[in-house]
Amino acid sequence: QVQLVESGGGLVQPGESLRLSCVASGDIFSMIMGWYRQAPGKQRELVALISGPSGPQYKNYAGFVKGRFTISRDNTKNTVDLQMDRLEVEDTAVYYCNADARTGEFYWGQGTQVTVSS
């Protein structure tokens, strides 16, 4: 069983930065980790994915990221971070951490609110 806890959300102005963190309890070593977001009235969408340390290494980003976000993981600390720079009003959403066990099992955190407003 894996539990995910996100932190780092908040209220910022357009152009500013936030760093989201996700701490996992349980073994996520071989899991694909990701960040998703859900804005009011919209479906949850992928923001970024990062592979585990075994197998092919990759980071994938949604098209709207446009080089502004960076996903990273620290397998010694069981954490996955999302550095978000040059935030835009359209980035306002609840951001969720996700773990894909690649067995059909997925785990979600409770989400952290990011609000970008002037």
Image (cartoon, helix red, strand yellow):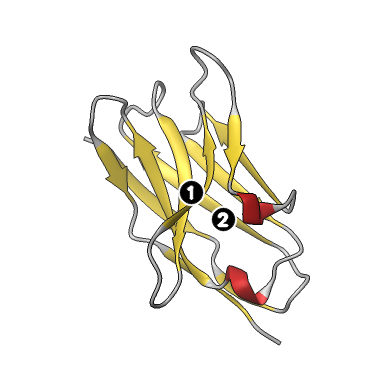
Q: Please tell me in which quadrant of the rendered image residue 31 appears.
A: top left
Secondary structure beneath dot 1 equals: strand
> Which residue is drawn at the image coordinates 44% and 44% (left, top)?
23
Residues 31 and 49: in front is 49
**Alpha carbon of mark 1 to alpha carbon of mark 2: how far?**
9 Å
> Which residue is drawn at the image coordinates 56% and 55% (left, top)?
20
Q: Quadrant of the C terminus?
A: bottom right
Residue furthest front as drawn: 63
Classify 52 as above or below 78: above
Secondary structure beneath dot 2 equals: strand
Dot 2: few (<14), some (14–19), or many (≥20) neighbours within 10 Å? many
User: What kind of residue is marked 2?
Assistant: Leu
Number of disc labels: 2
Residues 32 and 78: in front is 32
Residue on which the image places disc 2: 20
Residue 54 picture location, percent across and down:
49, 13
Dot 1: few (<14), some (14–19), or many (≥20) neighbours within 10 Å? many
| 69 relative to 4 in the view: left or right | right
Residue on which the image places disc 1: 35
Q: Please tell me in which quadrant of the rendered image residue 42 appears.
A: bottom left
| 86 relative to 10 in the view: left or right | right
Query: Sequence order check: which comes first, mark 1 or mark 2?
Result: 2
Residue 68 picture location, percent across and down:
73, 54
Residue 55 picture location, percent across and down:
50, 12
- Are dots 1 and 2 in contact, CB under 8 Å? yes
Residue 11 picture location, percent across and down:
60, 78
Q: Quadrant of the N terminus?
A: top left
